[in-house]
Amino acid sequence: MNETAVPEASRRVTIENSLGLHMRPTMQFVDLANQFRSRVVVRKGKHAVDGKNPMEMMLLEAVRGTELEIQAAGADAEDAVEALAALVKSGFGEQ
């Protein structure tokens, strides 16, 4: 095992709230992502954006049913991915 390796984690999620990833849930996601030290990347197909940047997150145009992959790299990567996936699964409190 490489002791200098940066911890990484990832999880696939599906946007479940009816209005998709509009500004309010985007800001919830970004605010939560910024509570972690890890770098957070969100992928939709070939597109990857910074999960801590609201403008980049809005570029995903993630409507209901969109599958995203949340990836984190850093000391708290697993905690970041778990928390962000739970937020998405909760429907951002809109259901």
Image: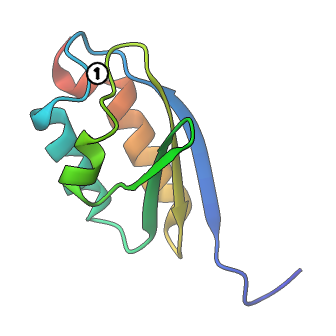
Q: Is residue 82 left or right of residue 83?
A: right
Q: Which residue lies furthest to the right in this view?
A: 1
Around disc 1, counting alpha carbons within 10 Å, would you say few (fewer than 14), some (14 to 19), or many (20 or more)?
Answer: some
Identify the amino acid type marked 1: Gly
Q: Is residue 10 left or right of residue 83?
A: right
Q: Where is residue 78 in the image (x, y as percent from the top left)?
A: 55, 57
Q: Is residue 14 left or right of residue 28?
A: right
The residue at which mark 1 appears reads as: 91
Q: In this view, does 53 lie to the left or right of 78?
A: left
Residue 23 in the image: above or below residue 66? below
Q: In which quarter of the image is the C terminus?
A: top left
Q: Determine the image quadrant of residue 9.
A: bottom right
- Taking the spot 56% from the left edge, 35% from the top edge, the residue there is 45
- Taking the spot 73% from the left edge, 90% from the top edge, the residue there is 4
- Taking the spot 43% from the left edge, 21% from the top edge, the residue there is 66
Q: Position of residue 27 (x, y in %)?
A: 15, 46
